[in-house]
């Protein structure tokens, strides 16, 4: 049952992060992607990053399911997943530049006419999600300690 | 900490996560819908109405509209920049409740010399429009620098 769950999880992550972006890029015309590139960045780069995240999340999910909860590897897999989801959130709200932490300024040059700068400020949500991440880390550590204590008690 | 406490802690985090997601969705909807509706459906289906009362006096009227679900603050800055330096600049902001509309009026009184400088080919008009919500913590904006206002 655990093995089936792990395989289904892997299929889900690969479908969402690898197959879906590949399919979307195949359906959208290259001219449209070139138009969006100054504002959203290179589609190939986004596809590559999503594929890497998808593979890592699949591995971490398999570890979470197959390794017992009292094992340190299980805790590390859970923590890794949480950090990767946080990275993914930053990646999306910063248009592919997670280092900007939710504040993004994209300038599009209009040749001799001038320029347009699009500004997005979502730092407040980055802070909220970061607080939730810390709370989740604490929860996972407590859960891990509890699982170990119960095993010790049983022995 | 007992298993029961851990479970309560876990459920609390889940609820907070859901609330943050809902707040995120509502605020994004508010700033984007207000931003788009203000820029697209102004007076005469244009964001700006420009009137020239006398040579050198220009009146810009901007119709702002909050189509979102939260209170939002809109800020507009208009400037004229000949030779890379700001000649005239004005900034106004307005707070709008959900589904409320408001007007921002800018009156520029330029001297003859300023008009000459402003209408050179190197002259640029700068325009900054920003829409913020949740006590100005979240926002979206656009800055335009357009040349050749002759």
Image (cartoon, grey):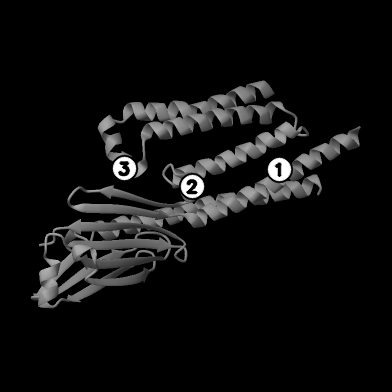
Q: Residue at x 17, y 50 (%)?
A: A112
Instruction: Look at the numbered disc 3 and give the secondary structure of its residue.
Output: helix
Q: Are marks 3 and 2 on the same chain?
A: yes
Q: Which residue is mark 3?
A: A38
Q: Is residue B10 above or below residue A9?
A: below
Nearer-the-camera pick, B109 or A77: B109
Q: Give the numbered dot on residue B126.
A: none
Q: Label 1: few (<14), some or many (≥20) within 10 Å?
A: some
Q: Are marks 1 and 3 on the same chain?
A: yes
Instruction: Look at the numbered disc 2 and give the secondary structure of its residue.
Output: helix
How far is mark 3 from mark 2, CA to CA?
A: 18 Å
Picture coordinates of residue B133, whole percent (x, y):
43, 62
Do the residues bearing badges 1 and 3 touch, measured as CB atoms within 8 Å? no
Instruction: Look at the numbered disc 1 and give the secondary structure of its residue.
Output: helix
Q: Which residue is mark 2?
A: A99
Q: Residue at x 31, y 50 (%)?
A: A107
Picture coordinates of residue B3, whole percent (x, y):
79, 45
Q: Of the two numbered discs 3 and 2 on the same chain, state the one appearing first in sequence.
A: 3
How far is mark 1 from mark 3, CA to CA?
A: 40 Å
Number of marks in the rendered image: 3
Foreground: disc 1 or disc 3 = 3
The quadrant of the rendering that contains the C terminus of chain B is bottom left
Do the residues bearing badges 2 and 1 touch, measured as CB atoms within 8 Å? no
Q: Label 2: few (<14), some or many (≥20) within 10 Å?
A: few
Q: Which residue is mark 1?
A: A140
Nearer-the-camera pick, B122 or B92: B122
Q: Is residue A102 above or below residue B78?
A: above
Picture coordinates of residue B131, whole percent (x, y):
36, 61
Q: Is residue A2 visible?
A: yes
How far is mark 2 from mark 1, CA to CA?
A: 26 Å
């Amino acid at each position: 049952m655990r093995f089936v769950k792990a395989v289904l999880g892997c299929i889900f992550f690969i479908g969402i992060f690898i197959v879906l972006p590949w399919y979307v890029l195949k359906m959208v015309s290259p001219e449209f992607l070139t138009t969006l590139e100054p504002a959203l960045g290179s589609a190939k780069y986004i596809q590559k990053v999503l594929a890497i995240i998808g593979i890592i999340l699949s591995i971490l999910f398999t570890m979470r399911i197959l390794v017992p909860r009292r094992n340190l590897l299980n805790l590390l897999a859970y923590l890794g997943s949480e950090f990767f989801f946080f990275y993914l959130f930053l990646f999306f709200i910063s248009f592919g530049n997670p280092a900007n932490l939710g504040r993004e300024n994209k300038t599009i040059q209009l040749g001799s006419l001038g320029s347009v700068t699009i500004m997005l400020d979502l730092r407040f949500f980055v802070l909220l999600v970061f607080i939730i991440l810390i709370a989740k880390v604490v929860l996972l550590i407590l859960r891990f300690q509890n699982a170990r204590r119960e095993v010790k008690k049983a022995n | 900490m007992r298993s029961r406490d851990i479970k309560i802690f876990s459920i609390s985090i889940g609820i907070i996560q859901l609330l943050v997601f809902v707040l995120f969705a509502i605020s994004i909807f508010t700033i984007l819908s207000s931003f788009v509706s203000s820029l697209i459906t102004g007076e005469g289906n244009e964001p700006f109405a420009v009137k020239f009362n006398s040579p050198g006096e220009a009146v810009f009227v901007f119709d702002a509209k909050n189509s979102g679900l939260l209170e939002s603050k809109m800020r507009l800055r208009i400037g004229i920049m000949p030779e890379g330096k700001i000649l005239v600049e004005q900034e106004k902001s307005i707070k709008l409740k959900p589904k409320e509309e408001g007007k921002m009026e800018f009156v520029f009184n330029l001297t003859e010399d300023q008009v000459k400088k402003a209408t050179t080919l190197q002259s640029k008009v700068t325009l900054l429009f920003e829409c913020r919500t949740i006590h100005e913590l979240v926002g979206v904006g656009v800055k335009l620098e357009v040349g050749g206002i002759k």
